[in-house]
Amino acid sequence: MTALSSFALSATFRAGLALFAALLYFGAFACCFSKRRAIKRLSLGLWIGGTVVNAVLVGNNWLVNGYVPFVSMYQVLTFLGVTFSLVYVYMRYVHDGEFMKAYFMCFQGVIMTGVFFMGRTAATWTFPPALQSAYFIPHVFSYMISYSLVGVAALMTCLSIFCREGEVRRRMERGIYELVLTGFPFMVLGMLLGALWANACWGNYWSWDNKEVWSLVTVMALAVYLHFRRHESLAKYAKYFVILAFIFEIITLFFVGMFGGDSLHTYN
């Protein structure tokens, strides 16, 4: 599909939309802690508004480029903001995770703040031939889902360490487990699809590329958490591997992408 660059929003307007979405998300986050029903409704409205504005940016990226906007870091982060909303809805209705909403909203605000500072990034990007594969979209989207789940799990883990209320802490620990249990298969799926894609493009499933290695380390950290949690003598150490997994996730997503040298996964 040919890119429709005439529909591209100006860099200033795109940055303004990103900032507006971030403010809406942070506003929704702040309202979560009120006990007044009207403020809680306002929180929901602000969150929906933030998601809509966020989705407008995703839609514009998609329209002007003519492909699912997963190519540049700017595109990925903008889409990731909406992904948090989709994942929260799943956790809310499938795992009774309404208490997690503040953590999702906080992350969305942080992400869209980052998108705001990247707002001068070019609207259109060339779609490299190597990315034009059937594995491309499910590979990236699987990682987006897993990254959002692990990010929230890590934030809740950090807070649970300092939480002294037994019932609240138990609820958070249950939520952390459900987040990781949901995210782990998507992370493994993302790696599997990436291996199939690599074999189709370059003739081998694994090349020990920097990003491949850090992705593997992240998966292993989550696997350790899931195993340690089932052993009474090791359970107390399990939560620290969720935090480590998030740190490895940040390295994989940002630092390898920006400073990956000759990595095949380096973002422009």
Image: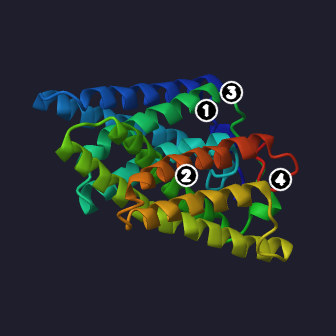
95 or 251, which lies in front? 251
Q: Residue at x 53, y 39 (%)?
A: 57
C-alpha span from label 3 to label 1: 11 Å
Q: Which mark is residue 120?
A: 3
Which amino acid type corresponds to the residue marked 1 in the rendered image? Leu
The local secondary structure at tag 3 comes to: loop
Q: Are marks 3 and 1 in contact (CB under 8 Å)?
A: no
56 or 243, which lies in front? 243
Of the image marks 1 and 2, the number of the one nearer the N terminus: 1
Of the image marks 4 and 3, the number of the one nearer the N terminus: 3
Q: Circle 1 is placed at which residue position?
A: 9
> Mark 3, residues whose alpha carbon is within 10 Å: few (<14), some, or many (≥20)?
some
C-alpha span from label 3 to label 2: 31 Å
The local secondary structure at tag 4 comes to: loop
Q: Can residue 164 be seen in this view?
A: yes
Q: Circle 2 is placed at which residue position?
A: 245
Q: Circle 4 is placed at which residue position?
A: 263
Q: Which of marks 1 and 4 is in front?
A: 4
On screen, residue 9 versus residue 223, left or right, reads: right
